[in-house]
Image (spheres, coloured by chain):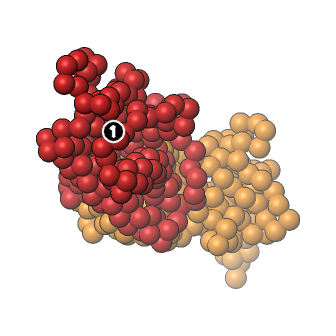
């Protein structure tokens, strides 16, 4: 019992430094999209299935935590044939790498409701350091985080072989996300 | 002009109309061939590039077709020879009206299909020239428009075959100078 009492202050210290428990993400109002250019033709797609644990407090951006797990097999380019193609081995290789993840720790305010967060993106079994920028918009029911993570598809060997040449499909891919945190 | 027929040979189209006719003809053959070939290709950079070329040609054809339609609406086509039976004159007018309609409808249906498929048209890869999307991305509508674009193309192709066959008949069998109207050369 005595041991417990002496441990108490440390326990308080511990909980104070821990990030706040993840807020509830409203998936119905959240999205993971991506955009790329194909001979300057802007194209977009999305991942229909993902899970997100996100903690954000505008008063303490440094305590921001984001963990977004993406189901790669839920990729949707708007056409069944393209969806099959993009899941193929030279693109996302969804069979071998069905999971993608974005993990961010901490954020710093850039002013004007904009934030920047460094993190790691894992795609096709390759993890790279990335920088996400996002905005936080307070709403009546919660906070809408909306942001973008620029990636280079060749860093993740997405579209390898004949596709590695970026003259047809550009190297730059913008992953856009919307996460709605309920109050 | 000894022995010239009583009815004069029809005049030729002007240089502008002729250039438009033959340039469009060439582009149509190219675009149709690319279209037929590209749809059967497996997903590859070549396939995407050919789709782009096909769309760029389509935009060009559409622009030239509008120019041509404006020219045709503001100019008279050379007269048809008086020797031509009435039904042929009527058939000629009807088929030419249809040809103009297809010249506009074919690229337009491709543009609509592209819009619904969510792949905007960016002529010659120049971002500033990107065409507005007339329709929102819609999978079912895209499938319907894909079929429509194809059906319009085959109909247009069939009509062009008829047009070529009729022109060759006039050139080789009737020898009435109809086809010469669209060919450069000395005025008879």
How far from the left and from the top, in percent, is residue B138?
Answer: 52, 66
Q: Residues within 10 Å of mark 1 (few under 14, many from 20)?
A: some
Task: Specify whether A127 is left or right of A132.
Answer: left
Observer-nearest of B85 and B132: B85
Visible residue check, residue B82: yes
Secondary structure under the numbered disc 1 in the rendered image = loop
Observer-nearest of B45 and B139: B139
How far from the left and from the top, in percent, is residue B9?
Answer: 30, 30
Q: Quadrant of the C terminus of chain A?
A: bottom right
Give the colour of chain B: red
How far from the left and from the top, in percent, is residue B3?
Answer: 19, 24
Q: Tell me what residue is drawn at x 44 percent, y 47 percent.
A: B100
Identify the subunit bearing mark 1. Answer: B
Vertical position of residue A111 compared to residue B2: above or below: below
What chain is colored orange? A
Q: Tell me what residue is drawn at x 32 percent, y 52 percent.
A: B85
Q: Quadrant of the N terminus of chain A?
A: bottom right
Q: Label 1, on which residue?
A: B81
Observer-nearest of A71 and B181: B181
Residue most toward the left?
Answer: B172
Q: Tell me what residue is drawn at x 76 percent, y 60 percent.
A: A143
Residue most toward the right?
Answer: A140
Total numbered labels:
1
Visible residue check, residue A39: no
């Amino acid at each position: 019992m005595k041991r417990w009492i002496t441990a108490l202050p440390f326990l308080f210290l511990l909980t104070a430094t821990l990030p706040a428990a993840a807020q509830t993400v409203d998936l119905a109002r959240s999205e993971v999209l991506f955009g790329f250019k194909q001979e300057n033709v802007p194209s977009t797609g999305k991942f229909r299935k993902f899970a997100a644990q996100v903690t954000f407090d505008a008063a303490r951006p440094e305590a921001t935590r984001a963990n977004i797990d993406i189901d790669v097999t839920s990729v949707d380019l708007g056409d069944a044939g393209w969806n099959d193609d993009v899941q193929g081995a030279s693109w996302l290789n969804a069979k071998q790498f069905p999971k993608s993840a974005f993990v961010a720790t901490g954020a710093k305010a850039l002013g004007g409701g904009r934030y920047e967060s460094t993190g790691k993106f894992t795609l096709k079994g390759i993890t790279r350091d990335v920088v996400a920028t996002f905005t936080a918009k307070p709403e009546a029911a919660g906070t809408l985080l909306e942001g973008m993570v620029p990636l280079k598809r060749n860093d993740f060997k997405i579209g390898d072989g004949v596709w590695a040449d970026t003259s047809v499909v550009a190297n730059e891919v913008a992953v856009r996300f919307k996460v709605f945190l309920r109050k | 002009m000894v022995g010239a027929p009583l009815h004069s040979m029809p005049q030729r189209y002007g240089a502008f109309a002729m250039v438009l006719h033959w340039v469009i003809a060439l582009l149509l053959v190219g675009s149709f061939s690319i279209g037929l070939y590209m749809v059967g290709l497996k997903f590859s950079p070549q396939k995407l590039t050919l789709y782009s070329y096909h769309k760029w040609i389509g935009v060009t054809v559409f622009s030239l077709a509008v120019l041509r339609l404006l020219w045709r609406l503001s100019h008279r086509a050379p007269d048809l020879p008086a020797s031509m039976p009435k039904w042929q004159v009527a058939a000629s007018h009807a088929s030419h009206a249809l040809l103009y309609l297809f010249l506009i409808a074919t690229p337009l249906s491709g543009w609509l299909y592209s819009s619904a498929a969510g792949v905007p048209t960016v002529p010659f890869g120049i971002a500033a020239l990107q065409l507005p999307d007339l329709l929102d991305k819609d999978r079912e509508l895209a499938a319907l428009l894909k079929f429509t674009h194809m059906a319009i193309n085959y109909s247009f192709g069939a009509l062009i075959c008829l047009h070529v066959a009729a022109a060759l008949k006039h050139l080789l069998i009737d020898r009435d100078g109809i086809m010469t109207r669209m060919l450069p050369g000395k005025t008879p």
